Image (spheres, rainbow, N blue to C red):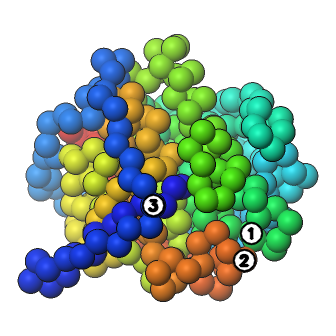
Amino acid sequence: MKPYRFLMLLLLAASFACTKGKTAAAPPASSDAPSAAADPAPALTDMSPPPTFDANRAMQYLKEIVAFGPRPIGSENHKKVENFILSHLKGDDVEQDAFEIHSTEGTFPVRNIIAKFPGAKDGIIVIASHYDTNWPLRNTSYIGANDGASSSALLLEFANQLRGKKLDGYSIWLLWDDAEESMRLPWYDPESLYGVRHLADKWQNDGTLKKIKAFILEDMIGDADLNIERVTDSTPWLEDLVGQAATRLGYQSHFFGREGDVEDDHVPFLQRGVPATDLIDFDYGYNNVFWHTTEDTVDKLSPQSLEIVGTVTLETVRMIDQR
């Protein structure tokens, strides 16, 4: 994701801004998808049990992903992680969206992986994570434990929770998107977010886009000191639902202590009118010091953080189903 500006919410409504890069604004929505400015989130009164999520199993997936080492696009390790993800989706309805990109660094294969779990209602909820690591850091020991591996492991555990169940709500598509990271540092927009940009175009052209009720992005969600940002360029009603879900489960202290905008995998869908949210903790170490460094390692992460984000995401999905 691209550096952004976040606003820290302080006591007594005092605040200050910290600028780390250019901010992004999405163009007006197209008419091909549900309006991202749809009706406000409903107040839910039911007392359904909290979602099930195996955080220890998700943490094991995370460790197995980073054990492959750095996984930049085009590398042998990247292919190994592709195969690792696919090996855990055997028997599921899986689509592989493969194509090539032509960048200043060369031509590379890209592969989005989509696992589809059908629901009773007409519509789709997409939950996404990128799985590649940073190309400019390919010759270092950078393994992206939090940035890419934590969220990819989260989706694998979502698949376990969804598999073999009759979904009363919308269909859920789990998306492991590829080539998210910029081919240059600092972040360079034209050579980043390749996977989601390609897929957003493809789904717009084939009519899938208008069926998507919500796009939920997971990114950097394993930090032991978890504080998910309120991303202000996300869809307001969907952000509100995330906050309601966190509050209902007792995790509100881990959400929305900061707010600001960020260019991330959700933006190509926002730009096409799809309601979207980005669950991201972009304060990884003091002043985000571990981000895109070799210090992004498993010892800084926690199964509890995976459980918090996992259960809040699944609760958010349940609330979307009730809209």
The C terminus sits in image quarter: top left
Q: Position of residue 27 (x, y in %)?
A: 34, 32
The residue to which callout 3 is attached is 21
Q: Position of residue 22 (x, y in %)?
A: 42, 55
Residue situated furthest right in the rendering: 76
Taking the spot 21% from the left edge, 46% from the top edge, the residue there is: 237
Which of labels 3 and 2 is toward the front?
3
Callout 1: SS: loop
Chain-order first, disc 1 or disc 3: 3
| Circle number at residue 294 | 2
Q: CA distance from mark 1 to mark 3?
A: 24 Å
Q: Quadrant of residue 144?
A: bottom right
Q: CA distance from mark 3 to mark 2?
A: 21 Å
In the image, residue 28 above or below residue 92: above
283 and 166: which one is in front? 283
For label 3, the crowd category at 10 Å Cα-Cα, with few meaning under 14, some 14 to 19 and many 20 or more, is: few
305 and 19: which one is in front? 19
Chain-order first, disc 3 or disc 2: 3
Callout 2: SS: loop
Q: Amino acid at mark 3?
A: Gly
Q: CA distance from mark 2 to mark 1?
A: 7 Å
Chain-order first, disc 2 or disc 1: 1
Taking the spot 34% from the left edge, 67% from the top edge, the residue there is: 6
Taking the spot 37% from the left edge, 63% from the top edge, the residue there is: 5
- Is 31 left, or right, of 184 in this rendering? left
Q: Position of residue 40 (x, y in %)?
A: 14, 43
Q: Amino acid at mark 2?
A: Thr
The residue to which callout 1 is attached is 143
